[in-house]
Amino acid sequence: TTTIRMKEEVKKQLWLSAPLIGVSFLQYSLQVISVMFVGHLGSLPLSAASIATSFASVTGFTFLLGTASALETLCGQAYGAKLYGKLGIQMQRAMFVLLVLSVPLSIIWANTEQILVLVHQDKSIASVAGSYARYMIPSLFAYGLLQCINRFLQAQNNVFPVFFCSGITTCLHLLLCWLFVLKTGLGYRGAALAISVSYWFNVILLSCYVKFSSSCSHSWTGFSKEAFH
């Protein structure tokens, strides 16, 4: 019986972990796909986009991802205690905190060119990378919100909607990159803009799910002033 219980537990863990692995891959792939499309424009845009993406990851995305991970504990405790209303409150607090944190991070991104020049990066690459990073600034705010919603749903073992929405977003992102980079004349700026649009699209998709799905009816009851207490 112990072996049977272990097998059942392993199945449950795989059932939850496999979609989460897919989500991480799909959400990160947006940045990679954009860089791949920029590669069609030449070596200078490709080098600049790669540097800007790495810089953005270190100074923005990774920071927000780590901060949002606190929700795994907070929402997990609330869900385990069957205080379902607390999940929505905790998510709102986290959203507010991450939006506030995104402001100074966006200022850093806006000065990417100057920072790269300070560390003796080639000026032509720094200039293009700075422009690329500026077009990515809207994605910073969306990314923070997205991670909060992800953690909110994961705490309720509601992982497949996150996976499906991420998959739909990735498909849209491929179309946007093709359109913005190769068809509209935006060039490398279009690739960065596509990241911003795609992350916001993912936020909207998951927000609609949270609002209208019966599975979130107890954990999400709308915005509340309690989140600021």
Image (cartoon, rainbow, N blue to C red):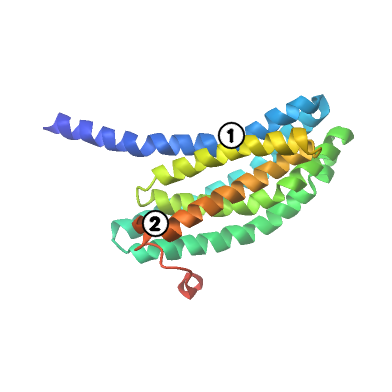
What secondary structure is marked by label 1? Answer: helix
**Residue 113: image location, x then y, percent:** 82, 43
> In the image shown, does 54 or 142 lie closer to the viewer?
142
Q: How many marks?
A: 2
Q: Which residue is mark 2?
A: 213
Mark 2 vs mark 1, foreground winner is 2
**Residue 101: image location, x then y, percent:** 63, 58
Q: 10 Å neighbourhood of mark 1: few (<14), some, or many (≥20)?
A: some
**Residue 33: image location, x then y, percent:** 64, 32
> In the image shown, does 67 or 178 lie closer to the viewer?
178
**Amino acid type at mark 2:** Ser
Residue 54 in view in this figure: no
Residue at image position (74%, 50%) is: 108
Q: Which residue is mark 1?
A: 29
Q: 10 Å neighbourhood of mark 2: few (<14), some, or many (≥20)?
A: few
Asked if 209 appears above or below 35 in the picture, the reply is below
**Amino acid type at mark 1:** Ser
